[in-house]
Image (cartoon, rainbow, N blue to C red):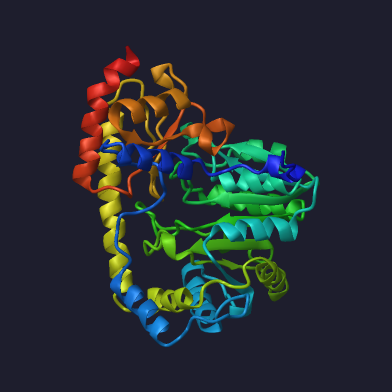
Amino acid sequence: MMNFANRISRLGTEQAFHVLARAKQAERDGRDMIHMEIGDTDFQTPQPIVDAAIQALRDNKTKYLPSAGLMELREVLATQLSESRGITAKPEELVVTPGGKPMIFYTLLALVNEGDEVIYPNPGFPTYESVINFIGAKGVALEMKGENGFNFDLAELRRLANANTKLIILNSPQNPTGGILTHESLQAIVDIAKQYDAWIFADEVYSQLVFEGKFESILSIPGARERTIVLDAYTKTFSMSGWRCGYGLCPSKEVADVIANLINNSVSCAANFTQWAGIAAWKDPSMPQAVADMREELRKRRDVLYAGLENLEGVSCHLPQGAIYLFPDISGTGRSSQDVYNFIFDEANIAVLPGTSFGRFGEGYIRLSFANNSVPRIQEAIKRLEAVWPKLIG
């Protein structure tokens, strides 16, 4: 029998990929599955980005790069982040990673010791809790409640924070809830981080997918810049999940150098040609309209799915202001999240996720992505749910 390191038992998983595998097997068995489980989009990567990648390959841009990333890309990212966040970002403060998840790993490895406390949103992106546990830190779950729009409960945040708090994680717009943190929440996070000299990790990968109002970064709050690492990625903004291109803005070159050394020791660098494609994503003049068109289509899909879910008995749904998910409260059905997930999968041939995939406070919810399917396909999903729902309630 193989004996694994003790730390492996502390490593969690992202359930979406397991459900995706189950749904793919169901399709091989002849079932017509509607995929609402994975946080992806069905849009094509915009052609200028594809063309830039092809040209980079033709130009033999397939070799190693500095671990921190291509300087030409970091210069473009510094300009974009400076303009969008209203701050001054320097290329040497940026690191480029193969996707967004590595920045979660690298940040926690760089800043948090065993036994340190990390406050994180729950329900929330499962990698936060998984990596916190993996490195031997103490995860402190802050419940995100539907009744307050899945914002931080500031009284609870102040109760949980203490001298042992090393890092506060936020995600806005949020996965899985679609909630957006208010200005008041962002201000409180900065104030508490300053009080206890803690770091902040801001996952802003859905910053371009805000449907009502404007995106507000925590970097807009005075005092945040010098203690905050911001994660962003091309995954959702440009429909590039498989390209694996993410990046992090660090508060200083010193922090970026530490992250770059972790990249050096793990993956060496992100792929060369995808970084050249990343430049085109932010520089091509057609991209702002392409992103706006995608955002409007996602809003339409959100509204159709929301209206359909609201009509189901025992379901109450928060209208998300951003991201690509609906996180309906299904506690009124009298069934657990796992039961409802299995029922929908087995009876309606729709792949969703139980809310508990995102932490213990996800019980009573399920998550559905509205980015993977056209409006007609979402309407088909609603019809299927309406047809089988009386069996669940009865």
Expressed as whole percent of the image width and height from the top left, the position of residue 320 reads 39, 43
In this view, the residue farthest toward the left is 376
| Corner quadrant of residue 70 | bottom right
| Corner quadrant of residue 303 | top left
The quadrant of the rendering that contains the N terminus is top right
The number of discs equals: 0
Expressed as whole percent of the image width and height from the top left, the position of residue 207 reads 45, 59
| Corner quadrant of residue 312 | top left
In this view, the residue farthest toward the top is 394
Expressed as whole percent of the image width and height from the top left, the position of residue 57 reads 41, 81
Residue at 37% across, 24% down: 343
In this view, the residue farthest toward the front is 1
Q: Is residue 143 above or below residue 47?
A: above
Residue at 45% across, 73% down: 274
Of 266 and 196, the residue lying toward us: 266
The quadrant of the rendering that contains the C terminus is top left
Whether residue 161 appears in this view of the structure is: no
Residue at 62% across, 38% down: 142
Of 26 and 170, the residue lying toward us: 26
Whether residue 265 appears in this view of the structure is: yes
Q: Is residue 210 above or below residue 281?
A: above
Q: Is residue 288 above or below residue 55?
A: above
- Side of 308 relative to 55 (left or right): left
Of 85 and 309, the residue lying toward us: 309
Residue at 37% across, 40% down: 25
Expressed as whole percent of the image width and height from the top left, the position of residue 82 reads 52, 74
Q: Is residue 334 above or below residue 225?
A: above
